[in-house]
Amino acid sequence: MNSDYILEMKNITKEFPGVKALDNVTFSVKKGEIHALCGENGAGKSTLMKVLSGVYQYGTYEGQIKINGVEKKFESIKESQEAGIAIIYQELALVPELSVAENIFLSHELMRKKIINWDKIYAESQKWLEYIGLDIDPQEQVKNLTVGKQQLIEIAKSLTRNTELLILDEPTAALTESDVELLKGILRDLKDKGVTCIYISHKLNEVLDLADNVTILRDGQSITTLPREGLTENEIVTNMVGRELSEMFPYEPREIGEKVLELKDYSVWNPNSHRPIIDKANLTLKKGEILGLSGLIGAGRSELFMSLFGVKVGKNKSGQVFINGDEVSIDSPADAIKNGIGYVSEDRKRYGLVLGMDIIKNTSLVTINNFTKKKIINSEEELHNVEQVSKKMKLKASNLESIVGTLSGGNQQKVVLSKWLLGNPQILILDEPTRGIDVGAKYEIYKIINELAESGVSIVIISSELPEVLGISDRILVMSEGKVTGEFSREEATEEKIMALATGGRENGIIKE
Amino acid sequence: MGSLKNDNNQGFLNRLSFKFDLRDYSLFIALLLIIVIFGFLTGGEFLSSRNISNLFSQMSVIAVLAIGMTLIIVSGHIDLSVGSLAGLTGGIAAILQVWYGWDTFAVIIVALIVGALLGLWQGWWVAYRAVPAFIVTLGGMLIFRGILVGLSQGRTIAPLDSSFRVFGNSYLPFIFGYILVGISIALLIYFTIRKRKRRKDLNLLLSHPAIDYGKVTLYSVVLLGLTYMLNRYYGIPTPFLIVIFLAIIFVFVTNKTTFGRYVYAIGGNAEAAALSGINIKRNVLNVFVLMGVMSAIAGILLTARLNAATVSAGDMYELDAIAACVIGGTSLMGGRGRIVGSIIGALIMASIDNGMSMMNIPTFWQFIVKGLILIIAVWIDISSKKQES
């Protein structure tokens, strides 16, 4: 009806088992505008875009999608592409070994009688590169370009397919300053040429710089759409967070003891990259303390603690690590385990569990040497210990010989926690410990974390969910772009303050209290 | 997924299970089918005492390789060099004995050491230099064969001392055979009772007594029958006895040692294993060293049985060994596989060879049939994995 709008999504609801990812979302984009989509991690931005692009095909969600006023029922990505929609993801989909031109025309090569017409491909590529204002030789291999330029190649590639609506998902997460400026210029230029753009970003300064309108999602709901004029970062943040801390978090104040872990100027970097992965991080962790670590995805939180745990995340590292006052050097997970550190990874299926093995063997994987005599396993002792810890964790399984791949997410996470607890660690690092876990199991895991802290274990929680960090931590550190950018006590921390530091904004620029 | 939801509130229950895992038995059924078919087609000749004795002697070399190969594949790798390595170590033993007059004990020790060292060499490339095992052992296959041709100057080396030939061409006296079977059956009953009692104490899933004791009865009958048949000829062949001995050791290693546990964890999920503090490189290296030693044992058995070392000894045995593992349920994706399964796999492969030869079917058919069986076995593995996930 209203063909001012290139895209209208109405009452979109998308449910996953146990989770409502999108709840009655309405989202409209006018022709020729740059429309920003903002929200915390898990607010539903990516899900919404997957619904739009046909990754979740018609019928798996409720609601209506109209393109240029016509209802569309996409069954595949291909159909959405044909309707003029193109998504550029954070992870680029280029073939690094091929040339720029080959990538641009990959899968729709220009042919002359079934034979590739290379002259035409190079000429056309040149034309499109000029069109978006990029000075690159079309015969250059893609792997020789910076990530930012590669992203622009993807944009050029999508434009060759008559794209009317371009969607950029966190385009600047991995870009350098100059590439960000280049991208902004090109997006403005494309806007003048009539291409509509949906811009998803955590970086609010970019959003305010580029967008004509901003739509904010929170907890799977569309909160509001605001015009750029008169909008402040603070207003966006308030709308993004805007919720009360519920009674989800069992927190009890406890005695906090001596310093257990201290990092001094801890840095990790690759020799040829633009910025260090971890840039001079300083932090302390005390006995029985729960330290929350907040920041955006890609801020270097996981990398910092994986590196501390002895996993190689960059080529070089420097700085000092003290455990109980003694300087230690940790070069492998085995070293870390010897120093009493446990690490629960954010991706439990990839890094935490051997999915084809049973509960017993997974649980005893770290500590199996405690149940052996001359490298021979004492099965009774192993089983006895596994059973005890599993009971403590309230693990639910028909029996301990169940294959862990068949357990629910919450129970799998309990197996990972049990695995580390069997070794009585003094420091436990939990990376996104409740990701993909239903609400009930989350509460149980928070309770376990509290009990552990009560018993004197020092805990680091890396979490992208702000309420979780605020609800459970004694102290909160914020990281941004590899640096520790701030520290708050439980009392002074608010979502707004954390978001401000995490998005790289200045603290006093946003908070007006 | 989600099949545990019914028991959510009850914790770990000890229940009696009548559940039959068909995968566990499909192997026995396949073997039985092959025996029946060949028994029928050869007019019973396939099941004669002499042929069964031959069959077990023939399968021994592949079975030894398959035992080592199981660990290699479980750890997520592959070894294409075992045939060449068996040929080389057997050749070295024969050269030292026939040309230089070394005694049997010394040449066996040397063969085992050479096997271990060459396993170490390959394991180093795979584990510490991250060259894919496929490539390293493909190279090894050529290198070891080349060394063998060079050392033997292309000649066949024979004959060996009678003390050496014992390993390939002797039999356990009747009476010892029966004593051995008696002890085995007694141990089988003892272990079954102990296992049931322990699992009950530890609240683990317990299968129905009829299933457990039925298995014991079945195994006992098979063991007794087999020994009776073998004793009607010359007795239990020594090489087969060696296979049994190695199988017991490796079953123990895989189930009861940290090394065995680590190998399965590494093959199942190397990243999770590494983050659990397991030294992936050293364990993978050890697996290759063990494979080298097993190749040497296979080489000794082969040379002893043929009473000669030839340039082409062990040619293509790697494929038979890999096929035996895969048929026996070892997953090429790593993390899953059992020693006993691989030995039965080796028996199936040997039965097909033996049965088709007896029927005077041309050799080319044997290649074709074995090739098809290999493809189908892997297909079953992959499709069953898809169903699980």
Image (spheres, coloured by chain):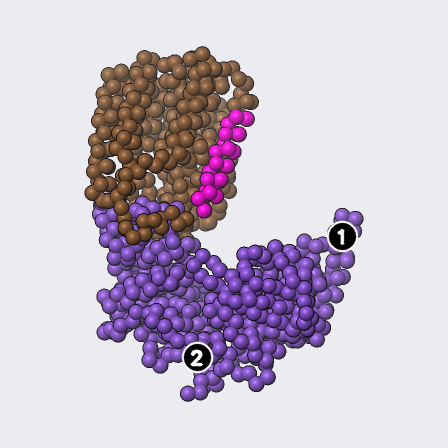
Residue beneath the point at 21% across and 33% down: B193
| Mark 2, other Cα within 10 Å: few <14 / some 14–19 / many ≥20 | some
Q: Would you identify the image quadrant in which residue A408 lies?
A: bottom left
Magenta stretch containing residue B387, yes or no? yes
For marks 1 and 2, give the CA distance.
55 Å
Q: Is residue B194 visible?
A: yes
Residue beneath the point at 24% across and 41% down: B199
Chain A colour in the picture: purple
Q: Work out whether mark 1 precedes mark 2 in sequence or the reverse, and give the earlier one.
A: 1
**Proximity of marks 1 and 2: CB atoms separated by less than 8 Å:** no
Q: Which residue corresponds to mark 2?
A: A496
B382 horizontally vs B265: left or right: right
The residue type indicated by label 1 comes to Met
Of discs 1 and 2, which sits in the foreground?
2
The secondary element bearing badge 2 is classed as: helix
Chain B colour in the picture: brown
The chain carrying label 2 is: A
Front one among A339 and A446:
A446
Magenta stretch containing residue A339, yes or no? no
Q: Which mark is residue A415?
A: none
Q: Position of residue B289 (x, y in %)?
A: 38, 40
Whether B268 is drawn above or below A260: the answer is above
Residue beneath the point at 56% across and 76% down: A225
Q: Position of residue B3 (x, y in %)?
A: 38, 47
Residue range (magenta): B368-389
Residues flagged by tags 1 and 2 on a common chain: yes
Residue beneath the point at 64% across and 65% down: A66
Q: Which residue corresponds to mark 1?
A: A111
Q: Is residue B83 visible?
A: no
The residue type indicated by label 2 comes to Glu
